[in-house]
Amino acid sequence: MSRRRFLSLAGASLASAVSGCLSGFGDSHQEIADWHDLHRVRDNRDRTYVLTANLDATTDGYDSHVGSAAGGWDPIGTRNELFTGTVDGQGRTITDLVIDRPEQDNVGLFANNAGSIEQLTFQNAKITGASSVGVVAGRNRGELTVSLSEPEVTGESGVGTGTGVNEDGTMTGHARDVLIQGETDVGGFVGRNYSAQIERAWTTGTVTGESNVGGIVGINTDESLVSQSYAGTAVSGQVRTGGLVGHNGVDGKVSDVHACGEVSGESSVGGLVGKNRGFGDIENGFVYSRVSGTRKSGVVAGHNVSGGRIQHIYWQSAEADIDTGVGVNDGTATVQELDTDIENTAEEMEELDFEGVWTVDESSQYPSLQWQTGKDACHASRTETAH
């Protein structure tokens, strides 16, 4: 073989390899560069996808699939036609997603996710549906690691930003400046957490509903877990309304959490949890909240039912009518009110793990979770109130 022929073949092989890498390592995954690509995911719901560009209202295909489409974006799949593949957002952003389907259930970018969606950010999404409504997925049975900014979500039951219903799934991420409206099982991140996990999540904004309304999740039940999470959300409802969890149901667990939002309702209203059912377990946390309720209302929890357990929760009331830790306690509760001025956080909150889980914000002397970066909304609100 001539040297020129050899170099030609070598160059072609190198170009082919580079092309394969850029297009997704050959056939190993498919790129999403515009709304047309995203829309085609519904044709192959078990594949691996990578977002290679930000998508917004100026991106090719937006008018066809979102802006001018009846009802806006058509969710990928259905409740029974699950997405089982992988989406790697690579930190990129989907902006201006619009879905307006008030009579439809399982509404979101995906109707029902059983795969993995990670490192994906959503900006300015506006979603309307009936039951099981969220920005990323109406229902989630897989893994979601997402960030949301200024999402507006409206529905009836099972309404959240990340997902409406998290069943057997795992969720991590945050939702900033949310505007959520629903009737029952309404949360700033997840509406209903059922045999599932929410870890390292946080929310700010406004959540409004009627029953089971919470800053992170509306209802947490059936061996579900909410851990290392916090909410600085204004939450309003009628019954079972909480700054972090509206209703911690049977065998629900909440651990290493804090909340600082304003919470208002009628019955079973709490700065952390509205109602803690029998065999519900809440432990290790801090609450600084304004709570207003007609009955069964407390800064930590509104109603702790017989068999429910609340322990190692520290609290302060932020100039509200309610200055009781637990409104009605029929179970076991160990909560401690703190003085207005905290001098030594680790000593005064000795039951919290300041070696492996918690840290102290030096400017405010209030506790934060170690994974948090920078000053969160809770510290800002406490500083403003103190001054």
Image (cartoon, rainbow, N blue to C red):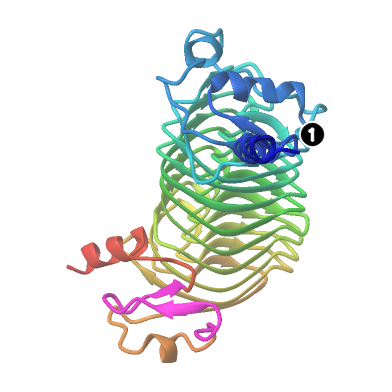
Which residue lies at the image location 75% right of the left edge and 21% below the top edge? 43
- Quadrant of the frame with the C terminus: bottom left
Q: Quadrant of residue 200?
A: bottom right
Q: Is residue 276 above or below residue 102?
A: below
Left or right, 125 with reference to 340: right
Vertical placement of 173 versus 330: above or below?
Answer: above
Q: Please identify the dominant SS of the magenta region.
A: loop
Asked whether the viewer can see residue 319, the reply is no
Q: Going 43% across and 26% down the picture, which residue do you hit?
A: 56
Identify the residue under disc 1: 46
Secondary structure of the residue carrying numbered label 1? loop
- 216 or 163: nearer the viewer: 163
Image spot of residue 170 (x, y percent): 69, 53
Identity of the residue furthest to the bottom in this view = 347
Q: Is residue 333 left or right of residue 25?
A: left
Q: Which residues are magenta?
A: 352-369
Q: Amino acid at mark 1?
A: Asp
Picture coordinates of residue 246, whole percent (x, y)? 57, 51
